[in-house]
Image (spheres, grey):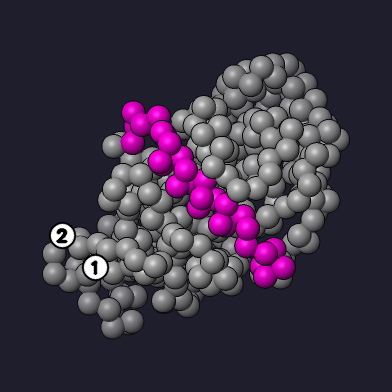
Amino acid sequence: MTTRDVENLLFSLGLDHGRIHPIIGGWAYWTFEVKLDGGDEQVESFKLGECHNPGWIFRFPRNRVVAENLQKEQAVLPVVAPRVDFAVPRFEHAGIWNGQPYAGYRRIPGRPLSDRQFANCDLAGETAGSIAAALSSLHDIPTSLVADACAVEPTVDAWRQRYRALRETVRTRVSPLLDSRTLDAVEREFERFLQEELATLKDVALVHCDLGCEHILIGDDGTTVSGLIDFEDVTIGDPTIDFVGIFVTFGMEAVERMRACYSRELDANFERRLHFYTWMASCHEIIYGLEVGRADLVEDGVEGLRTRLGNAGLL
């Protein structure tokens, strides 16, 4: 997708607009920020989940699986929106354009937690508490309301089966690329995760499942979560997985500050599963790199896997 494609789509929708900016990065979508006609200055306000902002975000899935996940988002997010105190995308435009699915929503005010202004932030009390409150409200949404849309059984066993299947994928795609020491660690830790660490997980929840800091928006006060975005991986699973982005960026002390404000009980194996999901993210990067023919992602994923296993004391 190009800015010209987006411009033609906006014309067909009758949307006046200013500049169209491609947002670089991300594996799943071609994403564009669309300014409204009238300049680049943004007047933003946020109140009770509504945003008034001269701009849109338009997203175009890169493949069939992502297109299916977009349909899932469209079903899940209307359930989420009225039950949380932060904004989530509300798709006002969705359909097919020149054979390509798309969805557009009003840009949510706030800066991503990955922004440079937060680079030296230690995620002190107020911000950690706001993120914990956001996760608590998301995870407290009854799974019965979203199970059909997520197409999963809302059980711990279903989550375990997901990772049993993923283990076979890792054995087929990732293992041949690993040195013997790393391979032994992956096999050992997968077995421990499935047999021991999931055994203490009492319940599952609605989880974002890809909550990197780039998907957490912080409002103008610099401390309060104004929105969460990019829910294409949303599912029902272990709430621990939504702490990974904070752990990777800010470390365990920040996670502990969040944990102190988090409303749900986190069991004795929370930290071990947190490390598991963290190094598993490198496996996902390797698998994606192989699928799209990106040798750089494969190389980065293999190196990241070694580093993360080593940092967790698992090598």
User: Label 1's element?
Assistant: loop
Name the residue beneath numbered marker 1: 54
Q: Amino acid at mark 2?
A: Glu
Give the amino acid at mark 1.
Pro
Q: Is residue 50 left or right of residue 63?
A: left
Dominant SS type (magenta): helix
N-terminal of the pair, mark 1 or mark 2, is: 2
**189, above or below 266, in the image:** above
**Left or right: 73 with respect to 152?**
left
Give the left or right position of residue 56, taking residue 141 as reference.
left
Kindly identify which numbered label has been placed on residue 4: none
Residue 80 on image: x %, y %: 55, 66
Query: How many labels, in total?
Result: 2
Rendered-image quadrant of the C terminus: top right
Is the C-beta separation of discs 1 and 2 under 8 Å?
yes
Q: Which residues are magenta?
A: 118-146
The N terminus: image quadrant: bottom left
> x, y percentage for residue 54?
24, 67
Q: Quadrant of residue 243?
A: top right
Where does the image place residue 83, in percent across and percent down from the top left?
54, 66
Circle on res. 41: 2
Q: Position of residue 192 (x, y in %)?
A: 81, 30
Residue at 66 percent of width and 31 percent of height: 271
Q: Is residue 262 visible?
A: yes
